[in-house]
Amino acid sequence: MSFLASASKSVAAASSDQALETIRRQYTELMLEIPSRIRQAKGEDYAQRLLASQREDGTWPTVDYADQTRGGWKTCNHLRYALILAKAYRTKESPLCGDPKVKTAIVRAVDHWIANDYICPNWWYNKIGVPMVLSDTVLLMQDQLSEEAVTRTLKIIERAKFGMTGQNSVWLAGITFTRALIIGDRELALRAREIILKDLIVTSAEGLQSDMSFHQHGPQLQFGNYGLSFASDMCRWARAWRGTDFALTDEQFSLLRRYMLEGERWAVYRERMDISSCGRQIFPDEQKRKASVVARVCREMGDMDDPRYSDAYTRIIEHTHKGEPVKYFPRSDYMTQNGERFMMSVHMSSRRTIGSETCNSENMLGLLLGDGAMFVYLEGDEYANIFPAWDWYRLPGITCHRGYPASLVPGRVRNDSEFVGGLTYGNVAGEPADVGTCGICAMEYKRFGVTAYKSWFFTGQAVVCLGAGITSKQDAPLGTTINQCLLDGPVTYRTVEGEAEVFPASTDRVIEGVRSISHDGVTYIMVEPTNLRVATKERTGTWRSIRHAMSGEPVTQPVFLAEIDHGTRPESAGYAYIVFPAPVTAPGSVGLLSNTSAAQAMYDSQAEIFYAVFYEPAAVIGPDDCSVSVDRPCILLIDFKNRCGTVCDPTGKHEEIKIGTGCGAVKVSLKPGRTRPTEFDF
């Protein structure tokens, strides 16, 4: 029996399967929601322009059919155009609905692809990208394509086979499920559903982590790349399967809800995704696109979910969160404070987590994105499309030599240290227990011949940034970048003389004895007078330097830069500054207690909270000359007002820690599991 005869028999046998018919109808309806978004992005006449520009042989003049790039493969646009036309052909509201010319254009496009069977150097397009687009096109146009065309396209679609891990597994199984709808194979559909949902679990491998972050390509934060596709696909299948025996269980849907409300929500602020969550996809307007996908998934989840969660979804969509809560993701070495007035994030890496990756000629300059990059957002657009003009060796928050050789760029990168972690403290109404009103994250940094001890104390209203023991053996200037963002408005500063001055435009120079500097609503308070290099100049670069598939046209942006220069071959250098997402003139209730390679500590006298990072057993003189000591390296927060605290061991090596507070000592048995904080009373 031929394959086509077998497929036709399967379709006939399954015609009475109401579940598959329902899913096919619902899945098609979901696909036809997309044209309105395409018209909004590309223009109302986009499909008509595609129709008019197609050649007689089914090709388009704007498609590069000889392209061999691994990322952003341009040849695949041919199939994307065909799918857009198929959606226009099937959408009742479209002026092209049922138009014979559109049908002819789609048939030509499919026939051309079948005849040429273009192959990309990157396996992903051959096994996922092409079969994904082609299967959706065939599902929409099956009754308009010839039997031979359906048979030959199915052979291409069959290249998507079960296997792999994380979102790659979900994609492959999803394509197979669509193929099952095309041929009417219920058993294949059931098997594909099983494979799709096997990844809707909490895992320590690639996929959804216990802290609701998402990993792919190893232990690497992927909220905006694979993790966002995971959320979108799981929501899509939940919608397509609803009302049938394929539907998600309550437990599965609950986990998907948690991922959106406790995971993805933290990566989006005011219609943009945090740069640290975008993965290697540093593309034009990608922060906005990714945030829009999070909002769409939340709208769709809200429509399906219990009404009691509607407010939580709405807060994500409209960004109306209450207060300024803090969350640390221990599985991904990522901390974010994301509230109604501002967002600040820190992304670190360690021996157990990957900081960033360069793959398929994407993120070619992102070598240092996991080295303690700290982004500060008030309006959300502070870094919008700055990337071609960025000095990538001066990312906000990092300590780095000025210029690394290009040979160090490719691959996936880690920090060679186990001491990287964080914790939060304080209860926030309506939030899970791991969300706090304040928190700490810290890392011992060891990369490229540089050693540094870096910590960030999130007080709720500000972030205290400390660096100590900064040492380098390389003959290259070393610096710590306070911020590098789009220049928006005047830059003002105060020195030891105390008079506020405006920094000149189009200038790059060192200011001596700086006590504070302000720009675009953010104030940076120096704990001690500090020499800062400040720049307010235009910078020029290209998108192609970041991703080879993009334009090589020069892009110029006005950039604000503030940097602490540690000199060449520093030994035990340091820094201490406070970031206030508001105009201020003094550090307020925050006081520095220690900033050494043994311990970094501060005290908030108003809240009566002691923050400390101990890189070794040590003691620090705390409030009221009270000594705070530990017998193990740890991250420690003590609430002196309520006589309680929380502690974690970032290395995961120790079972207990003895803490002395001046009011007596307490032994804390640590929770199993690396970096998990343990609460205690004293």
Image (spheres, helix red, strand yellow):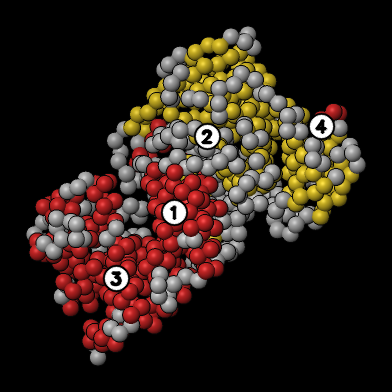
Q: Earlier in the sequence, mark 2 or mark 1?
A: 1
Is 80 positioned to the left or the right of 349 in the image? left
The residue under label 1 is 298
Number of dots carrying numbers: 4
The answer, for residue 466, to whether it is visible in the render is yes
User: Badges 3 and 1: C-beta atoms under 8 Å apart?
Assistant: no
User: Quadrant location of the N terminus?
Assistant: bottom left
Q: Position of residue 204 (x, y in %)?
A: 60, 62
Q: At label 4, which amino acid type do we have? A: Gly
Q: At label 2, which amino acid type do we have? A: Arg
- At mark 3, the secondary structure is helix
Q: Residue at x 55, y 29 (%)?
A: 581
- Residue 622's tag is 4
Asked which quadrant contains residue 231, the reply is bottom left
- Residue 341's tag is 2
Q: Residue at x 46, y 73 (%)?
A: 195
- Per the model, the C-alpha gap separating discs 2 and 1 is 21 Å
Q: Earlier in the sequence, mark 3 or mark 1?
A: 3
Q: Position of residue 306 (x, y in %)?
A: 49, 61
